[in-house]
Amino acid sequence: MIDRLIEEIKKNIKSEFDELTDGAVITGYINDAKKKVFPKIVLISEEFRTDPAPDNMATNNNEDGKSGALIDFRRKLIVDIYEANSNTAEKWASLIISLIIIKQQELINKANTKARANPHRSGSLEALEIIDRLYLVKGFLNADPDLKFRIEFDIAGRLKLSGTVERSLHKIKDVKIQIKE
């Protein structure tokens, strides 16, 4: 659900830092062979969360069969930095945090514009994710010999769901009522 935001972040990292080689910024998990090319910056979307409280899932059903729901969500964005040494990893971590925090409104606006222009659709169902805010949660050096630094962000937003529910109408049966007088 935050793939559009991740793509905007990836594009900004590549354009902002000229010294990064092709393939230095990727999305998703990577295998051991790819870790050996330094620096390697990996953007990962993890853990979708929502408040299970009933008022978080406000639904509406119209007589015309259209239904919708608005759900607040949180999503974890992880930025892993693979680097030959801790000092250089910390340099990249601070620069990436700076880029994401300083440009967060621009990144969010671009991701939301793309989402509105092309929501996820299948048949009569539609899902539109709107990102509201991005929070830096933590950053830390890692004991893994290849992964030197991990940054975690929390993404807050709303998921707008809509669709058409088929309703079948049945003719009311004619019932004869006999009245005794």
Image (cartoon, grey):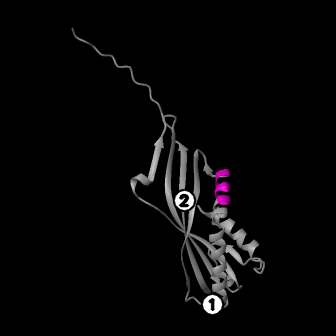
User: Which quadrant of the figure contains the N terminus?
Assistant: bottom right
Residue 86 at least partly seen? yes
Q: Which amino acid does label 1 sit on?
A: Ser
As helix, strand or loop, the secondary structure at mark 1 comes to helix
Which residue is painted at 58% across and 44% down in the image? Answer: 124
* Residue located beneath label 2 in the image: 157
User: Which quadrant of the figure contains the C terminus?
Assistant: top left
How packed is label 1: few (under 14 Cα within 10 Å), some, or many (20 or more)?
Answer: some
Taking 39 as reference, is 110 above or below it? Answer: above
Question: For the view shown, which residue lies furthest in the top direction?
Answer: 181
Marks 1/2 in contact by CB < 8 Å: the verdict is no
* Residue located beneath label 1 in the image: 86
Residue 31 at least partly seen? no
Work out whether residue 65 or residue 25 is closer to the camera in this orientation and state it.
25
Q: Which of marks 1 and 2 is nearer the N terminus?
A: 1
Q: What stretch is highlighted in magenta?
A: 109-117
Work out whether residue 121 or residue 52 is closer to the camera in this orientation and state it.
52
Q: What residue type is labelled 2?
A: Gly
**Magenta stretch encompasses residue 82:** no
**Magenta stretch encompasses residue 110:** yes
**Residue 128 location in percent, x, y?**
59, 53
